[in-house]
Image: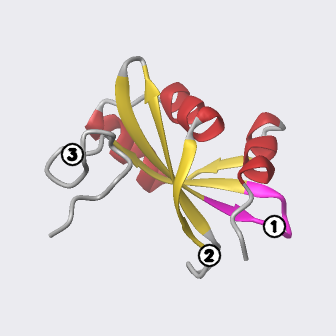
Amino acid sequence: MIFDHRAFTEAIADGRIEWRKHVLARLLERGISQACVMDCACAGVCIQAYPDDMPLPSALVFAMVDNEPLHVVVAFDEEAKKTYIITAYKPSSDIFETDFMTRKKK
């Protein structure tokens, strides 16, 4: 299955989004607002799709939000037409190239 960026952004726009307790705790720890996560998820670029993730296909989305790089992992339930925010973090330059989309080779 190909991850459909348009489908999950439409779900977000329609309010069909679920924030798990875990992600909310991580956002608080990392100083990332829900608004920044929503901006990234809706306007960002899908840099990696995980179509075989269980229980739902997911994707890693990147955007510059407030002049800071941000990664958001989202999952989409095609049947329920609902988006789940899995996690969000500021990508590390130790792991990613300066574009923050390309993983460094080991």
Q: Position of residue 81 (x, y in %)?
A: 83, 58
Q: Residue at 22% of width from left, 59% of height from top?
A: 104
Q: Position of residue 56 (x, y in %)?
A: 64, 74
Q: Residues within 10 Å of mark 3 (few under 14, many from 20)?
A: few
> Between disc 3 and disc 2, whose residue precedes?
2
Position of 63 with respect to 93 (left or right) is right
Q: Residues within 10 Å of mark 1 (few under 14, many from 20)?
A: some
Q: Specify the amino acid type for callout 1.
A: Glu
Position of 61 with respect to 71 (left or right) is right
Q: Look at mark 3 in the image and give the residue it sits on.
A: 92
Q: Residue at 62% of width from left, 75% of height from top?
A: 51
- Judge whether 78 appears above or below 12 on screen: below
Q: Residue at 28% of width from left, 37% of height from top?
A: 30
Is label 1 in a helix, a strand or a loop? Answer: loop
Label number found at residue 51: 2
Position of 24 with respect to 28 (left or right) is right
- Judge whether 5 appears above or below 68 on screen: below
Residue range in magenta is 75-82
Q: Look at mark 1 in the image and give the residue it sits on.
A: 78
> Between disc 2 and disc 1, whose residue precedes?
2
Is label 3 in a helix, a strand or a loop? Answer: loop
- Judge whether 33 appears above or below 89 on screen: above
